[in-house]
Structure formats: structure tokens, C-alpha cells
Image: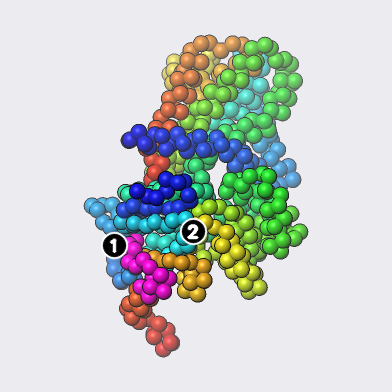
Amino acid sequence: MNGFSSGQPGVWLEKVSLTLPLRPLSNRNGTYGQTRRGAGKIEHRGNKRSVSALRDINLTVPYGARLAVVGVNGSGKTSLLRVIAGIYQPTSGRRVVNGRVAAMLTTAIGLNPRATGIENILFAFNLYGIKRASAQDLVAEISEFSGLGEYLTLPISTYSTGMRGRLSFSIVTSLRPDVLVIDEALATGDHAFQERARDRILDLLTGIKVLVLASHSLDFISEVCDRAICLESGQITCAGSCEEAWESYLGVRKQNSAKTPPSIEIRKL
Amino acid sequence: MTWEMVSLAWADLRGSLERLPLVAWLGWRDALLPFRGAVIGPYWITLYVAIWSFGIAYIFKHNLGAQEPHYLVYVAIGVTLFTVLTTFFNDGSQAFVKDAKLILNVPNPLSIYILKLAVRGCIEMVLSLPVIAVAMILTGLTLQLPALLALPGLVLILLFGVGFSLLLASLATRFRDLGFAVRALMRFMIFLTPVFWIVTSQSGPRALLAELNPFYHLITIVRDPLLGSIPSMHHYVISLACATCAALLGFLVFAAMRGRMAAWL
């Protein structure tokens, strides 16, 4: 039924929903204006509140597919990536994922400020389950790409923000999993690094068998992906080509900007 | 709770055992990295145990420790083991909360964040050994054959600690007040537990209080053999029962809450 009996890497979600619980907070009264369209709905049940992050997601990403996920802030992109990665368990529905999954959701992958660059690299290998045999080559590759040189022998706390970003970017992009879920907002560093980072992501993504990419850039997704979905309030509103999903995403964005006038007042000042 | 939840939790635990290098790294990170940059470094753990043991032994040796010729060793072992138990309880209840970033961004079994506590506990014990050794030399105590019995005792302490941490971590991720409650209670537990005082020198409610305290039995089955005597059977029975219950209960609660754990972080 799911077409994965052959054991090929792939992602299959059936009617997947995810609600994220909220703890009771003391101050919840008052009017805060309208929430922008497209974010997950906050649900009230008696005294309890929760965010409906994903609703009835049906999704198949077969072997060889490169899927882009677009949507406004809070529409459920990261939640979807986390469900695919197995970090969040769906509240209802079924999730089947074949193959070795890696998630690159943030560059803040838990680098330890007191540990040196090299120690952090080795820690990340353990964290992502990299075999010892390939570790040596990877360390060399990472130190070359990050361009950190002798800084790698120093604790991360001595790095600038950009240098930290370069290190974690180099680490996460050195992994070669079967299934990759990735947030494009990953690229950091100065201008020169960003250009190389883009090349490296492209290079990495071509080696991946199944890709799910969350992004805010049409150029990037149409370069990398062959299909796309648009999320709105945790639901798939459009599934098709990158351009189609992008149109749907722009539709939500346009409505939001029509609703938000305060930028004029700033100009008056 | 369904059978599937239990088998998923079991798979989680097995997955952690396949990732022992990562478990060891996390233990090392928690136990030793905080001391980076300090000249004395991780030996602050040794010093901490030394200050407590020698200080307490000096102050109380004539009243609380009058009947124990090796009171200094008694206190040093007690302080060491209590420190390890404190690690399991305090850090255990925060195990998932503190590493929320790693849990939410890298798919890994959750129980690695519990097993690392055992690594950390062992590192702390090794660093405390010099204090116990010096105390033994100073009081002229030599290890006797029963000392070997301390090893199964240590295994029971680790099992109890890991099981209880699993329980506390699972519950405290959902109910954040628990973490604070545990820390408040642990402050007090060192007085409730016979670390500075000796049970046989007490009578009435205080001795009863010790009997009801699992820490007492767990510490005794390691401390008594090292002091040269064989602990009475009831200490073993209670320790084994407590460790098994903690492990079972921890596992079941973990199994029940595992699916929603990340959502509560």
C-alpha cells in the first residue's frame, strides 16, 4: 500500500495531526489584535490551550523526490520536518519513514561553548551516528570548508557568532544521510561564506535520495526541488510544482500585508 | 497504555545502548566540561568531598561518630555516594528539559539523556576515591575481603539511580514543578540519611526514619563492606526491591509519556 515494501528510502504520512500542548499561564486575558493568517490555530478546551500544529497531513515523498515546503511563519513547516525526522510523534495518523534520517533544522545544534571546535565536531559525529572510520576524513573536510584553522583548537566560546555559524553549518552539511529534512535558513556567516554555503547545500542535496526542504526563497526551491507543498495553519493547501505552491504562499502573504497598516505610522514619525 | 508504547520505549532503550560513545560523551560533558578554565579543574569534585568529609568528621567525631573507629571513612563514603544520588535526582529530573535543544533538533533515543547520568555518576565516584583512600590511611583501615561486596552494591545504586531518573525526567518534563520539589527535598535528604550519623547510635523515630529511607540501605550495602563488615540481609532485600521498582516504574512511566515528551519541551 505504501510502496516501501522494497525498503527504498522514502517518507509516507497518512492523516497525520499534531497538537502541541501549552501550559497554563497566569496572564491570558486582554486583547492582542488579530493573529496573522496562516499560523497554527490556538485551541481552547476548557481551561487548557494547545496549538494545532499539523492537521490531517497526507504526504508521500518517494525515492528520488525533492520536496519543498513553503508557508508563512508558524504554518507548521518545522513541525512537519520534526514529525518526518521522528522527533515529534504524531498525535494521530501514521508515519512511515525508511532509511537513515538526518534533520538540519537549526545551526544551534547544541555546540558546547566550553569544548573546542574539534571536540564539538567529534561530538556532533556521535550525535548524528557517524561511523568512526569516516570521522578522520570528515574532520579534515570540515576544517577546510569552515576555514577556522587554528581556532578549531580553541573553545567555541572564543568564536564570533559568524564563526560559530560557519562551524555548525560545515558540520551538519558534512553528513550524508538517505533522508534529509532541512531548513534553508541554515546558511550564515559573512557574504563570501554564504555564497560557498549555497554551493555546498546544492552539492549536498544532489547526493540525497529523499529530500524535504523548508524555504522562503522561490529561486532556491525551484533550483533544488521538483515538487512543493504550501502549508497554512498546519494544513496542506496546495501540492504541486514549486511555482504553484509559491502562488498559494504569496496569496496568504498578500492578505496579511493588506491587514497590517502600522508601517505607515512609522513613516509619519 | 498500549503494548506498542512499551515496545517503542524498549527500542528507545536498546537504541541508547547501541550509542554508548554518545552516552559517554554526554556524561563527560556534564561531569567535566563545567570545570574547564579552572586551574584545579574537575578535582574540585575531589576537594568538595574532601572538605565535607574532613570537616564533618572533625566536628562530629566525638558525639555522632563516637562508636565508629573509622568515622572519617564512614563519612567520606557516605558523602561520595550521596553526591552521586543527588546527581541522579537533581539532574535526572532536568535531563530532558536541559537538553531540549538537542532533543528537538537531532533525532536520537531519549534514554541516552538518562544513561549519561550513570557515566557522570561513575566519573564523580572515581574523582572521590582519593579522599576515601586518604581517609583509610589516616584511620589505619585496610580493605578486607568483604570489600568486594561493595561492587554489587554499586550496581544496585546505579540501577536505582537510572530507574528513578527515568521516572523523574519523564514526569518533570510534563510537570515542571516536580524539578523544583526534588531539589528542595534533596537538600534535606542529606540530614535524613545516615551520612553523618550512625543508625545504631539512634533510637526511636530517627532510626525508623532511616529504615524507611531507600538511600540508607543503598549506601549501607556499599559502605559496610568497605568498612570491613558484611551488611545484613535485609539491606540487600530492600535495596534490590527499591532498585527493581524504580527501574520498572521508571520504564513504564517513560513508555507512557515518551510519545508526547518532545511536544512538552
Of the image marks 1 and 2, the number of the one nearer the N terminus:
1
Residue plotted at (65% across, 28% down): B53
Residue plotted at (51% across, 30% down): B161
Residue plotted at (47% across, 38% down): B12
**Badges 1 and 2, same chain:** yes
Q: Mark 1 against mark 2, which lies toward the viewer?
A: 2
Q: Position of residue B5 (x, y in %)?
A: 37, 37
| Residue A166 position by quadrant | bottom right
Residue closest to the eye, A178 or A16: A178
Say the numbered circle drawn on residue A64: 2
Q: Which residues are magenta?
A: A232-248
Residue plotted at (47% across, 74% down): A218
| Mark 1 burial class by Cα count in 10 Å: few <14, some 14-19, many 20+ | few
Mark 1 residue element: loop
Q: Position of residue B152 (x, y in %)?
A: 58, 19
- Above or below residue A269? Residue B117 is above
- Above or below residue A224? Residue B137 is above
Reply yes or no: does residue A240 show up in magenta: yes
Q: CA distance from mark 1 to mark 2?
A: 49 Å
The count of marks equals 2
Q: Is the C-beta separation of discs 1 and 2 under 8 Å?
A: no
Of all residues shown, which one is farthest toward the left? A46
Mark 2 residue element: loop
Q: Amino acid at mark 2?
A: Gly
Of all residues shown, which one is farthest toward the bottom? A268
Reply yes or no: does residue B151 show up in magenta: no
Say the numbered circle drawn on residue A29: 1
| Residue A228 position by quadrant | bottom left
